[in-house]
Image: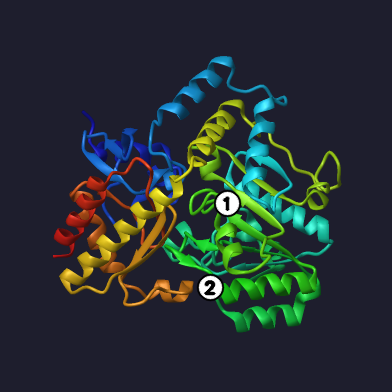
Amino acid sequence: MKSNEQLFARAQQVIPGGVNSPVRAFRAVGGTPRFIERAQGAYLWDAEGRRYIDYIGSWGPMILGHGHPAVLDAVLKAAADGFSYGAPTEREIELAEAIIGLVPSVEQVRLVSSGTEAAMSALRLARGATGRHKIVKFEGCYHGHADALLVKAGSGLATFGHPTSAGVPADVVRHTLVLEYNNLAQLDEAFAAQGSEIACVMIEPIAGNMNFVRASVPFMARLRELCTKHGALLVFDEVMTGFRVALGGAQSVYARLIPGFRPDMSVFGKVIGGGMPLAAFGGSKDVMSQLAPLGPVYQAGTLSGNPVATACGLATLKEIARPGFFDALSAKTRSLVTGLEQAGREAGVALVGDSEGGMFGFFFASALPQNYGVVMATDQARFNRFFHAMLGRGIYLAPALYEAGFVSAAHSAQDIAATAAAAVEALA
């Protein structure tokens, strides 16, 4: 049996940092990353045979848990018919119809292979449709690693403390305006000064890359109002929240609170692929008709609409659309957050959490942060100690303070209770 340490040492010889996505390296928390051998239901097993209750869920897609029978069956049947064709399939239409049926703001979608690709393409489309160049994003929101969006991003960049990435020319980001999340005054000021030049505003409605921070209702309402007034497109990055916080995504949560609310474009990923590489971006027919082959905005991808990935995504969406699914998932997630907060009270430690659907976050703080600066000021050293104490007790949390967590339908009440009990011991 190979140890995690042996595998990590070997990986570092052939893969930069030993990982294929930076946050996996455990640099933020220290120690050796766990190399996973297999997963089933709510559990992961590492190379040394240790079992963990999984609250990462492949960073969101595994909403049903690992190896769900209906999803596995769909994938095996699709794979038997062929891995990739480079030609249209009926299943692509079915997945597009499923997404459109669940998200009223979307009339057409284009399937791609990653969240980064979807966000990058949505940005290009917004610029092409409006004829404008400037975009607005918010500090702490991460929209993938496209050059124009790597400006004070969260996620792995926040983990390593870099405000941007090397290799991104200043000319590429000069049209990107970065504002503070939930800051109404900055929002008003930006649109007053440059509203006629702004092509779009891209936002994570519930940010999952500075842990879990939701946009306030007044902030979101004002954002919608300003975009409409100035002719800018409001783009919801729901790669993480889409079909994870609610069946209609985060936009359905805001639509219940803001009459008539809907974004102009949406970006999806993770859950719609069920764990396979698949993402999408969509909006009105008027906007989407600007895409090639109909319009002048070019976008293409060899593996877009992959037949195995679409089978996985369709089977996943079918399961989560069953009556009562999100009520049960939300209750589990709230129970987990309540258990963590109770553990903090018992230990005399300031700990506060929040959740929506199957997505959650917690902070070592006395109040929920509203922006990236406040998140950065929370107790990272305590989080790192807590992370390792939980890992040692078989609880696999995100290995960075700046990442949200995920609960699946496969998590049992016993799993939640075991996690809360482990938190009590860890904080003690």
On the image, the x and y values in percent for residue 342 come to 22, 66
The residue type indicated by label 1 comes to: Gly
Pick whichever of labels 2 and 1 is earlier in the sequence.
Answer: 2
On the image, the x and y values in percent for residue 127 come to 78, 59
Disc 2 or disc 1, which is closer to the eye? Answer: 1
Residue 199 in view here: yes
Residue indicated by mark 2: 216
Image position of 298 (left or right of 21): right
On the image, the x and y values in percent for residue 304 come to 66, 34
In this rendering, is residue 268 above or below 373? above
Q: Secondary structure at mark 1?
A: loop
Q: Secondary structure at mark 2?
A: loop
Residue at point 69%, 25% (across, down): 89
Residue at point 76%, 70% (across, down): 228
The residue type indicated by label 2 comes to: Ser
Image position of 201 (left or right of 205): right
Q: Nearer the viewer, residue 288 or 180?
A: 288
Residue at point 48%, 54% (across, down): 245
Residue indicated by mark 1: 248
Outermost residue to the front: 323
Image position of 157 (left or right of 328): right
